[in-house]
Image (cartoon, rainbow, N blue to C red):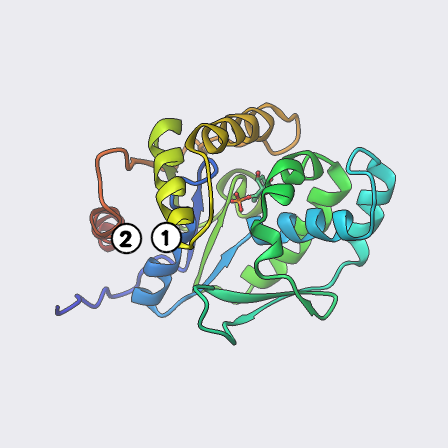
Amino acid sequence: MCEQVIPNPPNIIAIDGPAASGKSTIGNLIANRLDYICLDTGIMYRAVACKALREGIDVFDAEKISALSERIKIDIRHASEEDGRQFDVLIDGADHTWHIRSPEVNQVVSEVSVYPRVRGAMTELQREIAKNGRIVMIGRDIGTVVLPDADLKIYLEASVEVRAQRRYVEELGRGKKVCLVDIEESLRHRDEIDSGRSIAPLRAADDAVIVNSDDMTVYEVVEHVMRIIAQR
Ligand code: DC
């Protein structure tokens, strides 16, 4: 396929949306097309949750979790193994690429993401990474809080049923034994906390373009977003 080259695409692109709405898949494909870097900021909150579990820190201990978020070193690098990973995620030098996606981390990551100091530490790192531009940044609050001046903001949504079904198929494909009802329940739980928190809640920025992917394939969403990019 001959892909169209877009002259002067938006320099900073924010993609926000609820858990499992396809942000990471879409964001990475868009970044590849534009030859931009892509940062999925969920990885950073997952890293904090993962490290807390590993160190036996109570996720409801705001002080300890906040201190952890201020000292943690998170490296996101090119994938060193062909086991389905998009990146290597190193936490304080150790590979935790798959641990950060575990059900245990899914269970507590939203709680950890509520603390103001955790958000402050992650936001600072994210702004630093975005400084050079040519970036697609993915999260919950990128268009509203982290990069309110982003050149393009996409809010990617899909119903919880569709998101659960997609995640279910994805996990089955990785050979995992999973239950659709549990996945849907976990997504509802995270949606509730992510949208209900007082600091940087999940919501579309006023100037975001809302894309509902319920009836679209990944390819269709990418093409749709590329058309939005071309029109900017
Ligand atoms: O996108 P994800 O499922 O990997 O994100 C994991 C959690 O991290 C999500 O439940 C909320 C939090 N998060 C956040 O609060 N702000 C962001 N910018 C990205 C993720």
Check the image and name the residue furthest to the left. Answer: 1
- Rate crowding at label 2 as few (under 14), some (14 to 19) or many (20 or more) other CA atoms within 10 Å: many
Q: Nearer the viewer, residue 23 or 80?
A: 80
Q: Earlier in the sequence, mark 1 or mark 2?
A: 1
The reply to whether callout 1 and callout 2 are in contact (CB within 8 Å) is: no
- SS assignment at label 1: helix
- SS assignment at label 2: helix
Q: Is 127 drawn above or below residue 108 in the view shown?
A: below
Taking the image as drawn, is residue 159 in sight? no
What's the residue at 28%, 37% (across, down)?
Answer: 213
Question: Does residue 52 appear left or right of residue 22 in this picture?
Answer: right
- Rate crowding at label 1 as few (under 14), some (14 to 19) or many (20 or more) other CA atoms within 10 Å: few
Name the residue type under label 2.
Ile
Name the residue type under label 1.
Gly
What's the residue at 71%, 39% (across, down)?
Answer: 112
x then y, percent, for residue 109:
64, 40
x then y, percent, for residue 190:
56, 31
What's the residue at 22%, 35% (across, down)?
Answer: 215
x then y, percent, for residue 43:
58, 53
Q: Quadrant of residue 91?
A: bottom right
Q: Is 22 drawn above or below residue 210 in the view shown?
A: below
Q: Quadrant of ligand 1?
A: top right
Distance in Å between CA atoms under marks 1 and 2: 31 Å
Taking the image as drawn, is residue 97 in sight? yes
x then y, percent, for residue 117:
77, 42
Check the image and name the residue furthest to the bottom. Answer: 80
- Residue under pointer 1: 173
- Residue under pointer 2: 229
Query: Residue 95, labelled with which disc?
Result: none
